[in-house]
Image (spheres, rainbow, N blue to C red):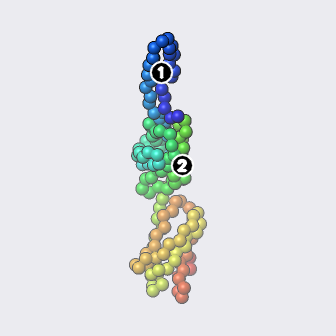
């Protein structure tokens, strides 16, 4: 399993003497291909991990290829600063055939701010809307969220403190 033999078979006739039947073999390899749609495809770094590791760069159309991949289990993960990928990574199993892993990309932005006053340090800040997240303002009362295009509401909270505005 996982190898090709040359020749595929060999006819041998035994007539009163030992005979030899020699073969050569090579490991079968396959290709993992895919396309990353959206602006984050062009120039994205795509990493292959698992049974083997490799890194490639998607072309201007967002297409990428890993060649010479042996059978086994892999994870394909795209990345590019300023972009979010859906899905974030994909499991791929090579079992006698080529495989495909496609992704969508979206540009990311930040929502960040400072909370003034004594309640800012350690305040819990909740993000709701197109996506949701929670973070804690640092000692400088600063917080940040990484988001994609959409509508959001940011709400700070800390026991014993009121915030103006209550949300934004």
- Mark 1 and mark 2 in contact? Answer it, CB < 8 Å: no
Residue at 51% in and 16% down: 11
Residue at 54% in and 44% down: 93
Q: Dot 1 corresponds to which residue?
A: 7
Residue at 40% in and 78% down: 140
* 43 and 165: which is toward the camera: 43
Label 1 or label 2, whichever comes before in sequence order: 1
Q: Position of residue 168 (x, y in %)?
A: 55, 74
Does the rendering let one see residue 161? yes
Q: 132 above or below 50?
A: below
Does the rendering let one see residue 101? no
Q: Residue furthest right?
A: 129
Q: Residues within 10 Å of mark 2 (few under 14, many from 20)?
A: few
Helix, strand or loop under label 2: strand
Q: Position of residue 152 (x, y in %)?
A: 56, 67
Residue at 47% in and 41% down: 63
Q: 52 above or below 131?
A: above
Q: Dot 2 corresponds to which residue?
A: 91
* 69 and 151: which is toward the camera: 69
**Tag of residue 38:** none
Q: Residues within 10 Å of mark 1 (few under 14, many from 20)?
A: few
Badge count = 2
Q: Position of residue 159 (x, y in %)?
A: 54, 85
């Amino acid at each position: 399993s996982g190898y090709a033999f040359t020749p595929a078979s060999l006819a041998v006739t035994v007539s009163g003497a030992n005979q030899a039947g020699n073969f050569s073999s090579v490991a079968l390899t396959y290709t993992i291909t895919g396309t990353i749609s959206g602006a984050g495809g062009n120039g994205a770094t795509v990493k292959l991990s698992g049974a083997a590791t490799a890194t490639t760069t998607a072309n201007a159309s967002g297409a990428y290829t890993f060649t010479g991949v042996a059978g086994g289990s892999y994870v394909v993960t795209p990345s590019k600063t300023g972009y979010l990928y859906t899905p974030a990574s994909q499991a791929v199993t090579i079992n006698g055939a080529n495989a495909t892993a496609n992704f969508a990309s979206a540009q990311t932005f930040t929502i960040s701010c400072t909370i003034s006053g004594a309640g800012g340090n350690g305040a819990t800040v909740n993000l709701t809307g197109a996506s949701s997240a929670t973070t804690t303002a640092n000692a400088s009362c600063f917080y940040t969220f990484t988001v994609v295009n959409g509508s959001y509401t940011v709400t700070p909270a800390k026991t014993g403190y009121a915030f103006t505005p209550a949300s934004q």
